[in-house]
Each structure stands twice: as structure tokens, then as C-alpha cells.
Image: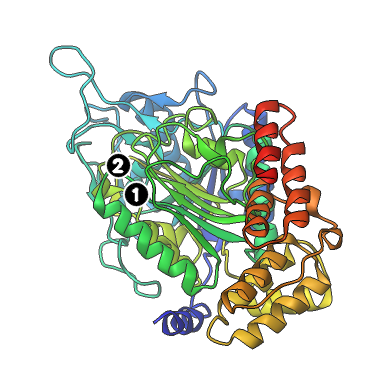
Amino acid sequence: MRVALTILLAAMATAHAAIDPASVVVVSAKGDAESAQLAAEYAKLRGIPATNRIELEIPKAGRDTVSWRQYADTILNPLRAELLRRNLIAGELGATADELGRLPLVLKGAPRARWIVLCRGLPWRIRRDNGPDGKAMGPSQGSEAASVDSELCLLASVDTPPHGPRPNPWFGTKDGTEPKDTGQLLRTARLDGPSLTAVLRSLKGMAEAERRGLRGRAYIDLGGPYPDGDTWFSRADAVCRALGFPTDVDKTKDLFGADARFDSPAIYLGWYSGSPKGKLAEPGAMLAPGAIALHLHSFSGQALRDSKRGWTAALVERGAALTFGNVDEPYLAFTVRPDLLLANLAAGETAGEAAWRATPAMSWMGVIVGDPLYRPFAHDLQAQMSDFGRQVEPAGAYAALRAAELMRDRPEERRRLLLAALLRCPRLALLLELSQDAVSAGKDFGWDNRALPFLGQEDFGLVLSSARFLKAHGKATQATELYEEAARRMTADPARAKALRDEAGR
């Protein structure tokens, strides 16, 4: 089954057209130097025409939340007017606003603009209005709250009351088939995060992944509160394995803990923690360049610029090139589907296409954070292995690990590949994989820590996992050296360092 799925995904990966940069509108905040810089650098990166860059006057720069009236006055109406002026949509704007302040748009033909990319500096949340008693209304499936991004999908449509989600016609469809009733709908994404530096770093990682390939491992955290969510993540696990990504799955209620292996996370999927914790909350923890990351939580995107409070911000801070969030209670049925997302990306779709085909609702709570033109599998595994054969670099070892994962039914060929990769690039992950294979085959294995020049840069959890593996299989001297390496990294926690050394001696 895995081989069949792998062949299917590989065949599909060449069948998808890229998004036309001329159909992308980039929106930034006027007077915000960082917002302007981000818009300029992104437009240059993707070749987006200067006429497709729009600045909006946003009072109270930096605010995250607006009322419906403020949304209409500072975002919707000005953006409609500017798109009309530039012939990116065709029609005319009415003169009389509705009760929410929205000036109606009368379209005359399909819009030329099909995508909107919002840059850091713009609000992202439309708050719930107060109820009849004057108190803020609680969450409900008829909530008036929404994300700015999701609401803007209806920019070129007839305005409707903001009560509850609107079905997304792209959801569940396959790329190459355009569903009906999409002519007046746009799709959105956002470049945002806790700092301009973090956002630019994520874009840089995305560009590297497109050029060199998405390289690393997959980590999936199960154990959420609802069975449907765990089913989605389990299906995503199958996609990761079909693609050859070595995949670790945590099935406990806790997230990946301090001792867990977490080297080169190219894919991270998890739930259900309100604020960042576990491995991705540790100082210095980073995802692989171009990483796809999602932590499913009802309010993950409320604090897009606070990496201590919101998962979406934390994942951007850690280098995620594509991530997601919710600005208010979305209800599980209306959140992005991680299994569909990964299957779409694996089939060669752009991040924007894949994400919207995996998102059930518009005019709702979701935020897609990342470049919609990003194609994480543009540089396929065969090309990655060809690169590794010509030029050795540490990250190339993870291309070899992925290729080896697809050879588990050919153990001798797999062993030769891993050994050749280890000789070219002596990484701990390769040596551990070879040694684990030997144990599974009932054979002894050789291990020499002196042949690991990158040991001091390896993931703490990988070092500790390797130490415990060596100790369990009679390599006490080598295990002690790795325990010592792990203990040296615990300078801020002497008790933990002592516990590691004690564990080595037991």
C-alpha cells in the first residue's frame, strides 16, 4: 500500500501549474517601514508586478483586532477601491454603505486578482460584537467573529451578514479541476509573525527548500481531545511515510518532551496545547528550512506576534515556512485538515492551493501563514540525491535517510545506501539508522564517536537516544561519551546533568 501511494504521489507531482504572480496582490500597511520592506522583498522574490502592491492606511499601527466597522473603513472599502482603480477587479463601488459600513461592490466580470497576500503590520482579527446585554458574545457556530484574511476571500462577492462560516468550494477538490461558483472568490495568505526577522528567515528557508528540497524528518503529536483529529493526524502520518520521511509519532497526551528526538523537523503536526510547550518551546529549537508546521488549537492564531502565547507565532519564530492559526473558536469541523494538506502538497500543489483545498470554510476563523506560491516538493527526492552525490553538506544526509526509508523492502540495497551516505557525510542520524538495522537483523555493529565531526551540533534528543541505544546494546564506552555530550549541554541545569551521568553509570 505504501509503495502504491508513493508511486501515485510521484506521478501526480508533475501535473500541477504554478500560481501566476500577476494574479497575486500584496497588501501592506502604509507608513510601516517593516511592512513595506516585507512587501517589497516578497514581491521581488516572486516577480509580482509593482501595480499589484497596495498600501492601506491603518490607524493605530500594530493593532491586531478591529471591529466590523473598522474592517470596512480601513481594509475592505479602501482595498476594493484600489483594486478597481488598478483594474485588478472590474466593476464599480456603491456610494451607500450597509449597517456594517461596507460599500457594496457591483462586479462586471471575473477579477484579474485571484490571490491576496497580507503583510505583517495589518490587523488579522475581526472581533465579536456585543450581545443584547452589552457583554461580549461567546463562541458559537453563528459567531460574528472572523479572521480578516478569511473574510477578504469574499472581497469581490456580494456582501452577506457575518454570521457563521461560508462553505469553501475548493475544499476537498483536486488540483486541475476548478469548482463552480468561484469566479467572485479570492484566496488569501499572510506573511506575519513575532518579528520581521522571523518572517524573513522563514521566507529564506522556503526559498532554500524550493532550491535544495525539503529535507528532514516528520514529527506527529497525537493524543488530542477528539477522535476525528487523531484520525486526521494518523492519515497524515501515512502520507509522511509514503513520501519516505522518517516519522516519529507521540501517542501520549503530552507533547514531545525534553528528551525526545527532534532533529531536522521538516514536518511537524500536533495538538492540543493552548500555549507553546515541549520541544518547540525550548530556547534555540528550530525547524528545518521550508518546514510545514501545524499545531491545532482553537485560538492558535489570536496572538500572531507573541511567540510565548500563540502557536502560530511560535512556529514562525522557529522557522516554519507554512503554518496555520485560528483567531477565535473555529470548531473542529471547520479547521484545516492536516491529512488533506500534506497529500495535496505531496502531489505537487503550491502551498496556497493545497491549504485552501484542505480548509472547509471561508468567512471564518482560519489564517494561512506563508507564501501561497511555495512548492515544498518542487525539488524532488531524486534531485536531492543527485545533489548529495555531487556536493556534500550536513543536511544532505536527510535526503539519504528519506531514500533509505523507501528501501525497507530491499535491506541490502538500503544498507549500502546508508553506508555510502555515512562515509560521505558522517552524521549521527545515519550511524544510528545503520546500527538499528544491524540489531534488527541480529548482527553486531561498529560505532566510533571520533568519526562524528558534527556531534556538537546534533540535536540533544538524538544524542541522548543514541546514548541509550548504545547502552542497551553493550557499547558502554561509546554510550558514556554520548551521555557526557548530553550532560555538557545541561550547564543551566546541574541536577539534570548529574542525572544523565548517573544514568550512564548504571
**Measured along the vertical axis of the image, is residue 80 above or below residue 359?**
above
**Left or right: 429, with 10 as reference point:** right
What residue is pinned by disc 2? 364
> Callout 1: few (<14), some (14-19), or many (20+) C-alpha neighbours within 10 Å?
many
Q: What residue type is labelled 2?
A: Trp
- The picture places residue 380, in percent across and down from the top left corner, at 62, 75
What residue is pinned by disc 1? 156
- The picture places residue 49, in percent across and down from the top left corner, at 62, 54
Quarter holding residue 140: top left
Instruction: Kindly identify the residue that appears in the image at 25 percent across and 52 percent down.
Output: 227
Q: Nearer the N terminus, badge 2 or badge 1? A: 1
Q: Which quadrant would the N terminus be assigned to in this image?
A: bottom left
Q: Is mark 2 on a helix, strand or loop?
A: loop
- Residue 200 at least partly seen: yes
**Measured along the vertical axis of the image, is residue 37 above or below residue 57?**
below
- The picture places residue 163, in percent across and down from the top left corner, at 19, 37
Between 260 and 286, the one lying in front of the other is: 260
| Cα separation between marks 2 and 1 | 16 Å
Instruction: Kindly identify the residue that appears in the image at 16 percent across and 19 percent down.
Output: 131
- The picture places residue 321, in percent across and down from the top left corner, at 58, 51
- Residue 40 at least partly seen: no
Instruction: Kindly identify the residue that appears in the image at 80 percent across and 48 percent down.
Output: 456
Q: Give the residue furthest to the top.
A: 134
Quarter holding residue 133: top left
Q: Which quadrant would the C terminus be assigned to in this image?
A: top right
Q: How is the image coloured?
A: rainbow
> Callout 2: few (<14), some (14-19), or many (20+) C-alpha neighbours within 10 Å?
many
Between 344 and 372, the one lying in front of the other is: 344
Q: What element carries label 1?
A: loop
Quarter holding residue 290: bottom right
**Measured along the vertical axis of the image, is residue 328 above or below residue 25?**
above
Between 218 and 289, the one lying in front of the other is: 218
